[in-house]
Amino acid sequence: MNLLECLVGLALSLVLVAPLIKNSGEFITKQIQYEKSQSLTAEADRALELIGRAIRIAGYQNAHSAIASIRKNTASIDYLQIQKNNGYRGSDSLVVKQEISQGIDFDCIGNALSKERTKKNLAQQGFLVDRQASAPKGVKVNGGSLICQSLDRQGRIQNTTLMNGIHHLSFEELPASIGKAFKIKLEMTDGTSIHQRFERIFTTRNLL
């Protein structure tokens, strides 16, 4: 086999192999995007469930509570508050309050609610979107951070990052025949090519 035959054989091999290499690269890219998309979906589901649980419990009143006598003077707006356009990229924030039940309840970071974790006998938890504080300077971030606000054992507000990749979060109150209904819109991003939108509707159980 002379040099020319070797070169021809090499060229033919490249012609045959090149599409396989290209297809393999495209497959790997799509696989990475799929895994990122699944991860963002799982994070969005977790965030929406935590927010929805807080909305459902907002305004809970314990029949044996020490503040039972002053409930009539507490407006429902005090138990659930939405602030518009005050977070990352104009995201909304939510704060809910409730009394402690006789059972075991948890806040948005998994702490068991107790009398120590209350302020004026009310437990409190909130959700807001802020810039990623942990991102190195100069590095492009993949959206903002979803922050859980809860009360520590001294009744002080503490902020805990639940997840990153939040592009936007909004709350919209809807008309409802029973309770108060809220539509939550959550946008997730990986900071480059993936951008997903999620919507859920939750109704309060204790507020009219």
Image (cartoon, rainbow, N blue to C red):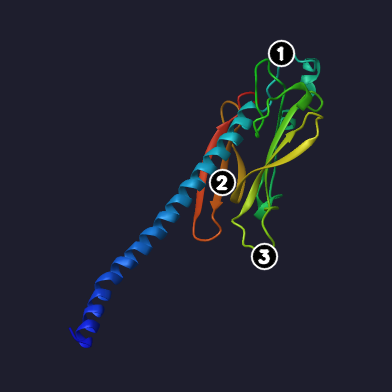
**Residue at left 24%, top 74%?**
13
Mark 1 lies on residue: 63
- The front one of 48 and 81 is 48
**Residue at left 59%, top 56%?**
142
> For the residue labelled by badge 1, is the local secondary structure a helix, a strand or a loop?
loop
* Mark with earlier residue (2, 3): 3
> Pointer 2: residues within 10 angstroms few (<14), some, or many (20+)?
many
Mark carried by residue 174: none
Which residue ends up furthest to the top in the rendered image?
64
Question: Quarter of the image containing the C terminus?
Answer: top right
Q: Amino acid at mark 2?
A: Leu
- The front one of 200 and 72 is 200
Would residue 95 be seen by someone viewing this image from the given angle? no
* Mark with earlier residue (1, 2): 1
Quadrant of res 171:
top right
Residue 104 place in picture, x, y as percent: 65, 20
Q: Amino acid at mark 3?
A: Gly
Q: Compared with residue 72, is residue 174 higher up or lower down, i.e. above or below?
A: below
Quadrant of res 138:
bottom right
- The front one of 9 and 166 is 9
Horizontal side of residue 165 vs 152, given as left or right? left
> Pointer 3: residues within 10 angstroms few (<14), some, or many (20+)?
few
Mark carried by residue 186: 2
**Residue at left 54%, top 43%?**
43
> Do the CB atoms of the residues marked 1 and 2 lie less than 8 Å apart?
no
**Residue at left 42%, top 52%?**
34
* Mark with earlier residue (3, 1): 1
Horizontal side of residue 189 vs 82, given as left or right? left
Residue 92 place in picture, x, y as percent: 66, 46
Mark carried by residue 138: 3
